[in-house]
Image (cartoon, rainbow, N blue to C red):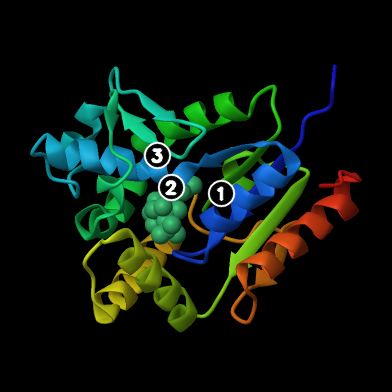
Amino acid sequence: MKETYSIAIDGPAAAGKSTVAKRVAKALNYTYIDTGAMYRAVTYAVIKAGLDPQNEEESITVLPGMTIDLLEDGTVLCNGEDVTKVIRTPLVSGNVSYIAAMKPIRLALVDMQRELANKRSVVMDGRDIGTYVLPDAQVKIFQIASVECRAKRRYDENVSKGIPTSMEDVIEDVKKRDYIDSHRDFAPLKQAEDAIPLDTSEMNIEEVVNAILSIIEEKTGVKA
Ligand code: CDP
């Protein structure tokens, strides 16, 4: 059987992980898995059902029978509904870290993530991929950038997608999520011991993609 590879890209909010992970996956012909979109989809389902996203007992009631599909073109389906756009709105961003701190929700999504990474080569981005979801990933990157840089990138992205936001709100959202994500008890945001840190503050997308592809080639011999 052909050997499969797992590439884990973790890091704080809006570090540009998904843009870069998508391109790296395309260059290698691997499957890209956006785990953040999965936590966002659950958050949306909780809000849509009129439940309190800060209440675990209420929130976990959306789990039984729930389906999340990540299509190749980037479309995200939650229970068959196209939620691609709505999961990026400030309402979902502002609540997702509460949902992501709930252990039963993490366990359910991690099962789906491991299943997706089974038997195929993947580039998976998130917070706990190198530490918890795929601890045996052959390549682990921890992508960082200054808060100012990350907020600017997310602000520009929101503007281009027509999502109304202010720079102040984006800075606050990024800081709040980083705090909750790195202080939760179960599988917090943390650099894996064997991860390679990559500070992308002064790098453009192409430079980051190329840096990661070089690391992958060095570690696995796989060439884009
Ligand atoms: O793209 P951005 O960095 O803004 O966030 P994301 O990757 O879409 O993740 C949204 C939120 O989901 C994060 O702030 C975390 O609370 C949560 N998350 C997580 O806990 N574990 C993951 N593996 C991925 C995301």
Mark 3 near mark 2, Cβ–Cβ under 8 Å?
yes
Does label 2 or label 1 sit earlier along the sequence? Answer: 2
The residue identified by callout 3 is 38
Mark 2 near mark 1, Cβ–Cβ under 8 Å?
yes
Q: Within 8 Å: ligand 1 and the Cβ of disc 2?
A: yes
**Other-residue count near label 3 (Cα within 10 Å), few / some / many at <14 / 14–19 / ≥20:** many
Distance (Cα) linking label 2 and label 1: 8 Å
The residue identified by callout 2 is 36
Q: Position of residue 81 (x, y in %)?
A: 26, 28
| Identity, as a three-letter code, of the amino acid under mark 2 | Gly
Observer able to see residue 1:
yes
**Nearest to the observer: residue 166 or residue 135:** 166
- Which quadrant does the N terminus fall into? top right
Q: Position of residue 170 (x, y in %)?
A: 31, 73
Q: Within 8 Å: ligand 1 and the Cβ of disc 1?
A: yes
For this view, does 193 lie left or right of residue 74? Answer: right
For this view, does 8 lie left or right of residue 35? Answer: right
Task: Report the residue that reaches farthest toward the left.
Answer: 50
**Other-residue count near label 1 (Cα within 10 Å), few / some / many at <14 / 14–19 / ≥20:** many
At 41% from the left edge and 78% from the top edge, which residue is drawn? 152
Q: Position of residue 60 (x, y in %)?
A: 24, 32
For this view, does 4 lie left or right of residue 186? Answer: right
Q: Within 8 Å: ligand 1 and the Cβ of disc 3?
A: yes
